[in-house]
Image (cartoon, rainbow, N blue to C red):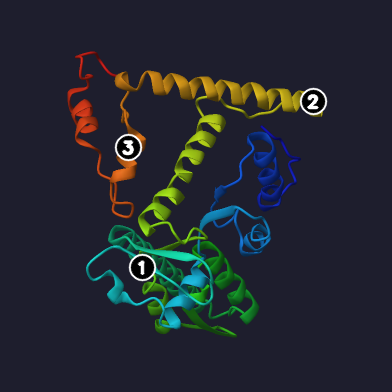
Amino acid sequence: MRAYPGNTADPATVPDQVETLRRSFGLRRLVLIGDRGMLTDARIEDLRQYPGLGWISALRSDHLRKLVEEGTLQPSLFDAANLAAIRSSQFPGELLAVCHNPLLAARRKHRREDLLRSTEQEFQRIQREIGRRTRKPLTATEIAVKVGRVRNRFKMAKHFRTRIRHSLLEYARKAAGIEREAALDGLYIVRTSETGMSAEDAVRGYKQLTRVEQAFRCLKSVDVKVRPIRPRAERRVRAHLLVCMLAYYVEWHLRSALAPLLFQHEDLEGWQAERDPVAAAEPPQDLQRKKNRRRSEDGLPLD
């Protein structure tokens, strides 16, 4: 375990951890998995300098949009499947696994429409207020302040065109921009330097980050509660973190050993290696049976 000062940015820890892994475990071949915030474009360029080092990450939405605009990413790719492997000159020497999730697309569409309607309702409220203020009309500055609050609240400024004058507010949706964003609904791209890897394995590898997220939830919330960190001396803070990591390690082993008595899959890794990496996860039959019966295969009550 390595602890860094609190003001250390996540991407800055990557090169140091690469060297630590090599020295500690004698690894010649290493593949890092990181989200878009950890393995940024700049960090990936740095990683290219390390021989025997690969990575799996994901593209940002602006990169995805460029692939659509240049024609590399076509909607017809998903006529028969929800996953496709493509190449692009923008990302030489990389495999791009393009995923389309209809459920995610529907959620994003619903969310965007809800925010657009809410923004319009607030603009209409401001217009009504402008209409009532006949004795002391609202100035352009006062209207702009109110409009700014709405923009900050719903984050939909990019989708509206506004015209503000003394005692006047006009607005309209930017239809073209909304359509361009809607074209990306449900799409995400996993990128990897491992060109010999299948698109399915690349996506499965990236989704293993959920285990890291679960570990952090265990450390930070109801299980271990690493915070608040009350010591002030550096050595005591490190000792506190070490004890919490050991507690999590024990908790992980207990969950693994007691899996038959818990509401969890007993062969999670095997199930994840076989299921569709893009489609919404359906609980396996044995786990669903445990939930319905609330008992193990041996008839013991579950917790």
- Residue annotated with mark 3: 270
Which label's residue is closer to the chain start, 1 or 3? 1
Tell me the crowding category of disc 3: few under 14, some 14 to 19, or many 20 or more residues within 10 angstroms, Cα based.
Answer: few
Q: Give the vertical position of 275 relative to 114 (above or below).
A: above
Circle 2: residue type: Arg
Q: CA distance from mark 2 to mark 1?
A: 51 Å
Circle 2 or circle 1, nearest the eye: 2
Q: Which residue is located at x 44 percent, y 19 percent?
A: 254
Mark drawn on residue 125:
none
Q: Which residue is located at x 49 percent, y 64 percent?
A: 154
Q: Kindly state the secondary structure of the residue where label 2 is placed.
A: helix
Confirm or deny contact between disc 3 and disc 2 (CB under 8 A). Answer: no
**Number of residue marks:** 3
Which label's residue is closer to the chain start, 2 or 1? 1
Res 48 seen here: yes
Q: Kindly state the secondary structure of the residue where label 3 is placed.
A: helix
Locate the C terminus by quadrant.
top left
Tell me the crowding category of disc 2: few under 14, some 14 to 19, or many 20 or more residues within 10 angstroms, Cα based.
Answer: few
Mark drawn on residue 235:
2
Q: CA distance from mark 3 to mark 2?
A: 41 Å
- Residue annotated with mark 1: 113
